[in-house]
Amino acid sequence: MKKALATLLALLAMQTTLVHAADDTASLTAKVAQFIDEWHDDAAHARLQYFDKMAKDGVYIGTDKTERWTRDEFKAWAKRFFERPSAWAFKSFNRHISMSEDRKFIWFDEQLQTQMGICQATGVIEQTAKGFEIRHYQLSLTVPNDLTDYLAAGVKKLEEKQAGQTPKK
């Protein structure tokens, strides 16, 4: 009887721990989602705190193949956009958030409504003593598969033109 009671108590303790862990995960996920939404809102309102949410050695990869910046490089490049009332406006409408077991690293993917149409992005966030910091963010245009060949041909033509070559037909 004592063994059965001890087993029952152990199972209840495990269930309580699992429920508590699930609550902690849900709470952290909500905080991360709020942090990302605030980051996007900072850009929408041209607030320079946008860059403070990125780690000093954080990386932002834009949609152009030349766009890979550290935080400070990105800030310098984007300066002209942040001098306007709105730098850019990205609104997430679908996001998935995952995290490491120790909850120190968080990664996410999201779909965004933007001035370029629907984009997709992925990011990595580190939870530090100071709070969340974006370590990596990559923004991508979405291209319907049916347009891939057409778009690839257009990109090739543009690159040949920029390289001074006569585009091939």
Image (cartoon, rainbow, N blue to C red):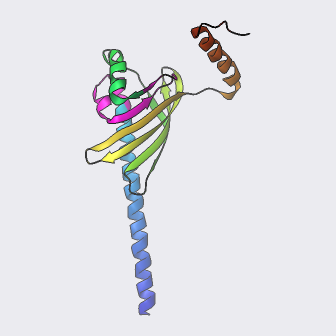
User: Count the marks: how many?
Assistant: 0
- In this rendering, position of residue 163 left or right of residue 83: right
Magenta-span inclusion, residue 45: yes
Nearer to us in this view, 125 or 17: 125
Nearer to us in this view, 35 or 163: 163
| Residue closest to the far right | 169
User: Which of the 4 image quadrants contains residue 71?
Assistant: top left
Magenta range:
40-68
| Residue closest to the far front | 164
Q: Quarter of the image containing the C terminus?
A: top right
Task: Pinpoint residue 29: horizontal percent, then vertical percent.
Answer: 40, 48
Task: Pinpoint residue 88: horizontal percent, then vertical percent.
Answer: 40, 21
Task: Pinpoint residue 78: horizontal percent, then vertical percent.
Answer: 36, 20
Q: Residue at x 44, y 34 (%)?
A: 137
Q: Residue at x 53, y 23 (%)?
A: 117
Residue 50 drawn above or below residue 166: below
